[in-house]
Each structure stands twice: as structure tokens, then as C-alpha cells.
Amino acid sequence: MVQLTDVNSYLASNGLGPAFLPFLSTGPDRITTLFYQPLGDVAALPHSLGVVERPELVLKMKGFLSLADSEQVQFATCPEYSCPWDALIESIEAGRYPSEGSLWSICCESTTLQTLTQITERLAASGITVFQPNVQASTANFLNLLCHLLWCTDAEGQRIRVVLMQAKTYPMGGVDYERDYLILGDEIYRFGNAGENRLACLICSDVLGPIVKDQIVSQLLADTLIFHLQLNKDAARDSFREYRQRCCFRTPRTTEILCLNWASGTRITTDNATFETLVREPKTIYYRPSDGVDGTDESILANDTLGCFLTFAAEHRTAAYVFHPDEQLFKFRTSKPLMIGDAAVSRRTGPVVEARFQWKEGAWLSSTEKVNDRFSEFLDSNPNVSTHLTPYEAKHVDMERVMQLSTGYVLKAEDFSWLNLPSFRLAEDDTSARMRVCWSNSSTGANRRIDCQSKFKSLAAFVANPSNLPNRLSAFRQLTPRISYDPLPFKQFRNLVAGELRSTAIFLGTDPAKEKMERTRLQIQDALHRVGERTEDLSLLYFSVEGTLTDYMDRDPPAINDDPGSNPVGITSA
């Protein structure tokens, strides 16, 4: 029967002291984490699961573990089936091991019970105390193991190195492969003590098991860091989302989760001959309550630049930090779920990415260049758009504001905050709609982004030929207008500017519903009125069914006065 086992109790039952993990205390210091999002061709065969290009991954994994050692991170991890045993064992034999007080949780390629005995002997020869996994009786072929590398004390009070092995407890659903070939474990380990922070690692489909869903998740709902380590084609399936929703939404909302997958482009083979793409979008995401998140433009930009994009899962009031999908290492620090005493003045905040590392010339090198979010490709192919958006290259959130104001997504002043900007809403399939996140064109989030980009591109094309602007914008016909965003309240909704001349021009697409156009008119005019701006200086543009550029403000004059101050019925008090 699968159970949640407290590591300190387990060590005590074996005559050892508790795991030495001071970073799980309730003090105000931040936790530093390094994780690897690997890329490879994975061979799923009857007696093993691991990468085809094993020598290359051995080098990369050794480099990852070496960097975790030299950077002195408090926690390091990688997704299931990823670390070749040679890389782990040879790194330990070379003296690379977590510093005292740190923890590495390393998922390894599959192994058989016979090979596990040899692995244990090699580790023991390096002075490591090894605890093999508790497994269920089985005639299956191999194990899927997570190795926790830590320090504790022996009976004499001397610090010793320990490797605690945790086996996957439930086979992946929807396929027969793990059901037929995987030897299952019966324990999920939890680090830390009651009254401080806890840490637990789940191996992919662990969360599908009935005991985990019905009994263990309820023990992870408070003061816990969960690292969900996966090789998963779609980490957003309902069966995988369900436990996250419980952990992030239920009181006291002090559980935080990193879902870590393999990189985009990871392929799988069952015969070492034919390959199919397994991971198109990793959905490696850090989830935490939105309360206390540093949502300043400066903080968002800093993380964006290093490949960590803030989004908002509104239904559960959860901040979701979406990591760039390519193969790389990320180093970030974050506050603890539980901080008390002197730490009470230290606000819980989201992750701050300190560095990302790319594999170049046989080593993991810190990348100082901005992450390739593929947005430059959109600008390069649309010079009319680039004219207006290039000035916002270092102002990512302002760029999103101007694009969404110009396309009818922003209707109220409060919509300009990251919590309310539609592009920051994490889509139902856990994909980002952020305007700069252009690595996918076939997801729900991508569809939202593409719709906004397409409409903005149309507006930019109109503005590029000002002589053809409609009547309400006739003052711009002899000028060179630009589409822009100004955070000053009285200018916030004025996105069309030429010198001191300013107006509001919004493009709503082809033949939008009249209800949508009227709602947009009412709300934008109300926003203009609230800051003392002329409500007549507004154009709502769209293509008619016949393909004619039309201004709703001219074609369908409202039945009531345009000025909400003159007749607010239907504006604010209908």
C-alpha cells in the first residue's frame, strides 16, 4: 500500500539522525533551486527506458551536477528517467555531492533489481549509506527511481552522506507500457518536520494513484514545496491538474509546486528505429498563490529576459510562472511557503530567476543574452507592427498593454494590471497567451495571442496609410501617427498619437457582434470620461462582411448621448 513516509522518522528507525536541511526552516532566507529541463530521444523498450544518445546525456548530467555543487544551491532536481546512472555515480565518486544542508533529488534512467544491487555497491564503496526503495511484489522488469542525496548524522553524531531511493508508485495511464513493465514502489518521501516547511517529490503518474489522490494529497496542502518530476506528453490533462488545484486553492494556500518536464522536441521510440515527438510543449511551470507576488513591471521584465514568464490561473487565484521550453538549466530563488517569527515581515514572493545555463562547447555556460521567445520573428515579418512595438522592447508589459488596448481586450483602467491583463491569463490547457511567448502556434494560449497579434497587425496597416483613416481620425491624415501606450491616467486610453494630438483607435476584427462593439464603446467611453477625456475622440474599427473598413462610431450612432456625464443610463447605472 502506497504511503507518505516522513524521512526523519524513516532515518530514525534505521538508527540515524534527521536529515540536515536547514533551508526548510521558517526563517526569512530564500531557497535557491537549480533544475535541468533535458532534451533527448527516449527509448521505451521492454526491459529499460532511457535516452538513445546516452554518452551525450552523461556529459550534460555530469555538468549539471557539477554546477549544482559549485553554485552551492540548496535544492537541485531533474525530471523522471533523465539521469544516466553513470553520470550520478561517477559524479559522486569524483566528490560532487550536495553541500551539507542541501538536497539533490535526481531522477535516473530505469534500472533492474539486479543492476540496482551493483549500483548500491558502487555507492557504498564511496562511503554513501544507501537505502534501496521499498517496492511492491512484481514480475515486471524495471524500476523508475528518484535518488535523494542528503546529509544526516550517524549514531555517533557524525555527519554522513545518504542516498534515499524512491520508486514510482503508479504506472502512466492510457498506455500499457509502464503497467506491463514497471516495478512499482510503495512510498513517497516527505522531508521536514511539523511546524516548518516540508518538501516532497512526486514522480509523474504518482498523482494518478487512488491512494495518492484520496489520502496523500490531503497531507500536502499546507507549508509544502512539491516538485512534480515528469516525462509527460501533456501535463495539463485533468487527471494531472486535479491535485494542483487542491493544493493551490484550498486554505491555507501555503503549498507551492514546480511541475518539471522534458524539453520541447523530446521524442520517443519503441523500436529504436521510428521516432515520434513526445513533448511539444513541456509546461514546466511554478505554481504559487498570487498573493504577495512581485508583479511590478521591472520584476516581470527581469524574469521574462531569463525565460520565466508570469501568468495568472484566475480560477484558482494562482500565479503560474511558465518556463521557456528549450533544453537548459534554470537557477532561481523563492521565498518559503511558511515563514514565522522574525520572518513575518518578509513577504512571500514568487520565484526570481538568477541565471539560466545553456550547453555550449561541452559545458553549461551562463547565458547573458535575452532568451529567444520567438517574438522577434513576428516583428521581423511585420515591419508595420515593428514600427510601433520596437520602442517597447525593454518594456514587455507596456507592449502587452498597447496591443490589447488597441484590439479591444482592455476596457477598464484596472485591466492594465498584470492580474487583469487578458494575455496574462493562463489558458485552460496550461499554455501562455503572453504576447511575447511565441514558441507555440497550436495551443489555446497561442490562439488567443495570435488573435490579438493579427488584429494589431491590421490596425498598424491602417495607421501606415493615414490618408485612408476614417472620418473621426481625419486629423491624423496629414501626420505620421504612432500606436503607443502612456501610463499617465489621462493618456492611458489614448493609443493613437501624433505630437500633441491623441485619440483612441481600436480594431475589433471582421464583422464583430454588435453587442461586443456596443459593450466596448460603453466601457471605453466610461474610462475616458472618468479621466476627463473627450469621449467623442474614439474610433471602433472593423471589417464589414464585404471587407470594407468601417467605424462603428459613425455607422451606428448610439441612441443615447456619447457623454456618460450627460446621460449615464446604460453607461454606469443601467
Image (tube, rainbow, N blue to C red):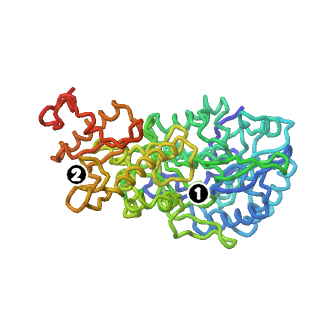
Picture quadrant where residue 251 is located:
top left
Tell me the residue that label 2 is attached to: 489
Q: Residue at x 29, y 59 (%)?
A: 481
Residue type indicated by callout 2: Pro
Q: Residue 124 in the image: x percent, y percent? A: 79, 59
Contact? badges 1 and 2 (CB < 8 Å): no
Q: Residue 540 in the image: x percent, y percent? A: 30, 42
Residue type indicated by callout 1: Phe
Earlier along the polypeptide chain: callout 1 or callout 2?
1
Quick check: 368 left or right of 515? right
Quick check: 406 left or right of 160? left
Front in this rendered view, residue 86 or 47: 47
Residue 75 marker: 1
Q: Residue furthest bottom?
A: 361
Mark 2, other Cα within 10 Å: few <14 / some 14–19 / many ≥20? some
Quick check: 551 left or right of 92? left
Give how far apart the Cα atoms at labels 1 and 2 are.
44 Å
Q: Is residue 457 above or below residue 318?
A: below
In the structure shown, which secondary structural element does the residue marked by tag 1 occupy?
A: strand
Q: Nearer the viewer, mark 1 or mark 2?
A: 2
Q: Residue 95 in the image: x percent, y percent? A: 71, 69
Residue 463 marker: none
Q: Residue at x 18, y 28 (%)?
A: 569
